[in-house]
Amino acid sequence: MKKTILSLTTIVFLLICSNGIQAQNATKDFDQLKLAQKYLVGTWQTTRNDTTWAWELKQDGKVLFEIDYIIVNGKKSVDSYWSYSYEPERNNFYMFAAYVSGKCITGIGSFTAENKWCQELFVPFNPEKILRKGEFVFDTPTSLTLTVFNSEGVKLGEGKVSKVE
């Protein structure tokens, strides 16, 4: 009986103590750009019934570009456009998605393991925190005047822009 109580006490003690022990630091500094090139870049698709969802992802420097398609009965339509901008200081990609329906979302994503991409998507923008404002006045269909203001509305600069194509 004493051996059983001693054994149970030892097991409970070890369980309580081991609760604070961690095997390894879970946040490694993975080379996010290399892993993105290896895993994310390319054309992907999945099919269910008569609908196929496909996406093409390309990389240019520290930016990824994605176009999502829906293919129904052989007819391919664009669903959304995504951009992923890599910020080395935070070791994350910051994402923006614009849907052809007019909806948009933002997100943050990164590789948390050599072969695991995790992302969180959010309601876009925060109008409470304005960095800068811009005003585009189209003088003609091929010419505009761009004016930039700081967050308080003070004019920072102005310039002409022309459409070339």
Image (cartoon, grey):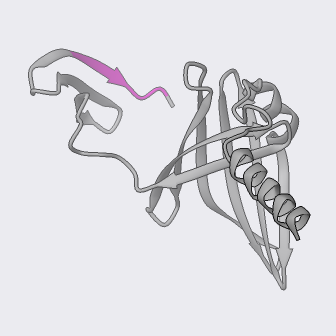
- Percent across and percent down for residue 83 are 59, 40
- Lateral position of residue 22 relative to residue 44, left or right: left
What residue sits 47% from the left and 26% below the top? 164
Q: Nearer the viewer, residue 149 or 8?
A: 8
Q: Nearer the viewer, residue 56 or 125?
A: 125
* Residue 134 is covered by the magenta coloring: no
- Percent across and percent down for residue 112 are 73, 39
Q: Is residue 75 above or below residue 84?
A: below
Q: Is residue 74 above or below residue 151?
A: below
What residue sits 44% from the left and 62% below the top? 102
Q: Nearer the viewer, residue 6 or 74?
A: 6
- Percent across and percent down for residue 136 are 25, 34
Q: Nearer the viewer, residue 52 or 21?
A: 21
Residue 87: quadrant of the picture: top right
Q: Is residue 123 above or below residue 33?
A: below
Of all residues shown, which one is farthest toward the front?
Answer: 2
Query: What main secondary structure does the magenta stretch of the protein show?
Result: strand
What residue sits 90% from the left and 62% below the top? 3
The quadrant of the rendering that contains the N terminus is bottom right
- Lateral position of residue 98 relative to residue 155, left or right: right
Residue 29: quadrant of the picture: top right
- Lateral position of residue 159 relative to residue 88, left or right: left
What residue sits 80% from the left and 37% below the top? 23
* Residue 162 is covered by the magenta coloring: yes
- Percent across and percent down for residue 122 are 46, 54
Question: What segment carries the magenta color?
Answer: 158-164
Q: Is residue 12 above or below residue 83?
A: below
User: In the rendered picture of this protein, how many numbered marks are placed on residues?
Assistant: 0
